[in-house]
Image (cartoon, grey):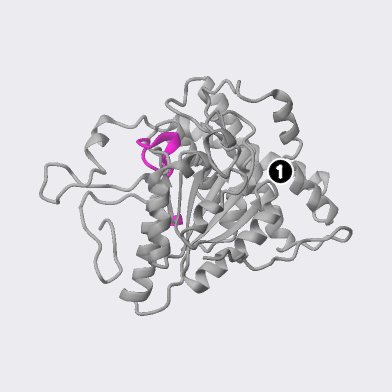
């Protein structure tokens, strides 16, 4: 099948800059990126203080990807991602309190402390989790797209109107489940977009050493007839413009797509990564292209940001993250009784069913299943 490029999107020219969104929205994106950066820096500190256990993969350097992609979506569009997921959770609307409490393994976390760093879930905001098995979230993204299309077209008798995002790292493109997912999405005309956050390294292996055609990852989807786009993931305005066009094409045509999102993580693969596979000169070169600084310069040039506004924004962001840490410290350690909850069992089994975390309002321990009247989950 011949390659079909996504619709062309005009770019801002030099001189008098025209933003693709309102100044208020652009400033909100800058605030969201700063929040993710500050949150991750404090997570690194908390990890070193042994308040966060297990694996911890920070999102520093890739903030423009999550913020720009989420901005291009509608609230009802599902999102699923891999284990570097704090940035996606915050960009999607999870509170920093619920996110930090989950990092600390506390009962007030988004998954009641049972998921931790790699498993951020936020059902009200249609974030269907970070997932720890490499590439395993890609079939889930296809399943979400199938579910929304079936509900829109079959149950409600209308037109498919939602698009699902399935994020993955460049190391996951060699997993067989990814190709099965793309094949199925193409066969069933499912509105899902596979976003490869291509930061150049599969953990500690440079992409060209382990992946064929690493210079053009979109070719992985070409055989399955997927729409494709290569996007500069270090510029949130570029991410938004290109993703918005692609998302709306997928929404209108109910077809899948693949994105080679070029980005770079400033820190290691995880907190235990000594980063010996790349030079400090390479890191410094890419850090000079910081997506947050790029947006600050753009907004200053557009006349919507000055030093006073930036200082006030940073003050509020730091206060929010400090308060989130205080909230996490004060939250109860998840009790052992939670081991027997949130386990999928028959209603007549020995377990007590499920209950929602505090930030979602709680729920009774009664197991129910999806009904055709549109109600779902817990009563």
Residue 95 placement (x, y as % from top left): 51, 46
Name the residue: 52% across, 35% down: 210
- Residue 136 visible? The answer is no
Residue 180 placement (x, y as % from top left): 38, 52
Residue 215 placement (x, y as % from top left): 62, 45
Name the residue: 56% across, 27% down: 44
* Observer-nearest of 207 and 239: 207
What are the residue bounds of the magenta stretch? 109-125
86 up-or-down from 227: above or below: above
* Observer-nearest of 311 and 257: 257
Quarter of the rendering containing residue 243: bottom right
Residue extending farthest right: 15
Name the residue: 48% across, 35% down: 327
Q: Secondary structure at mark 1?
A: helix
49 up-or-down from 202: above or below: above
> Magenta stretch containing residue 117, yes or no?
yes
Quarter of the rendering containing residue 320: top right
Residue 101 placement (x, y as % from top left): 45, 36
* Observer-nearest of 23 and 81: 81
- Residue designated by label 1: 292
């Amino acid at each position: 099948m011949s390659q079909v490029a996504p619709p062309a999107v005009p770019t801002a020219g030099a001189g008098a800059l025209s933003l693709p969104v309102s100044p208020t929205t652009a400033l909100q994106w800058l605030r969201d990126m700063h929040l993710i950066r500050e949150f991750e820096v404090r997570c690194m500190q908390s990890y070193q203080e042994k308040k966060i256990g297990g694996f911890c993969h920070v999102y520093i350097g890739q903030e423009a990807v999550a913020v720009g992609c989420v901005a291009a979506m509608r609230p009802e569009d599902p999102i699923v991602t891999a284990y570097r997921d704090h940035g996606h959770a915050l960009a999607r609307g999870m509170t920093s309190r619920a996110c930090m409490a989950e990092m600390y393994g506390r009962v007030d976390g988004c998954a009641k402390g049972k998921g931790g760093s790699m498993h951020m879930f936020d059902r009200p905001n249609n974030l269907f989790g970070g997932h720890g098995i490499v590439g395993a979230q890609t079939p889930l993204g296809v399943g979400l797209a199938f579910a929304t299309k079936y509900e829109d077209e079959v149950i409600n008798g209308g037109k498919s109107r939602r698009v699902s995002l399935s994020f993955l790292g460049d190391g996951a493109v060699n997993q067989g489940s990814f190709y099965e997912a793309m094949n199925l999405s193409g066969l069933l005309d499912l509105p899902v977009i596979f976003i490869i956050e291509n930061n150049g390294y599969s953990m500690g292996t440079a992409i060209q050493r382990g992946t064929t055609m690493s210079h053009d990852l979109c070719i992985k989807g070409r055989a399955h007839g997927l729409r494709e786009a290569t996007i500069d993931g270090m510029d949130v305005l570029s991410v938004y413009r290109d993703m918005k066009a692609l998302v709306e094409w997928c929404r209108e045509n109910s077809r899948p797509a693949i994105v080679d999102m070029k980005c770079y993580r400033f820190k290691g693969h995880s907190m235990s990564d000594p980063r010996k596979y790349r030079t400090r000169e390479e890191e410094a070169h890419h850090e000079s292209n910081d997506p947050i600084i790029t947006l600050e310069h753009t907004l200053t040039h557009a006349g919507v940001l000055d030093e006073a506004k930036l200082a006030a924004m940073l003050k509020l962001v730091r206060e929010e993250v400090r308060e989130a840490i205080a909230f996490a410290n004060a939250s109860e350690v998840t009790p052992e009784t939670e081991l027997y909850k949130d386990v999928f069992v028959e209603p007549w089994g020995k377990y007590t069913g499920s209950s929602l975390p505090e930030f979602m309002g709680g729920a009774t321990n009664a197991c129910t299943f999806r009904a055709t009247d549109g109600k779902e989950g817990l009563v």
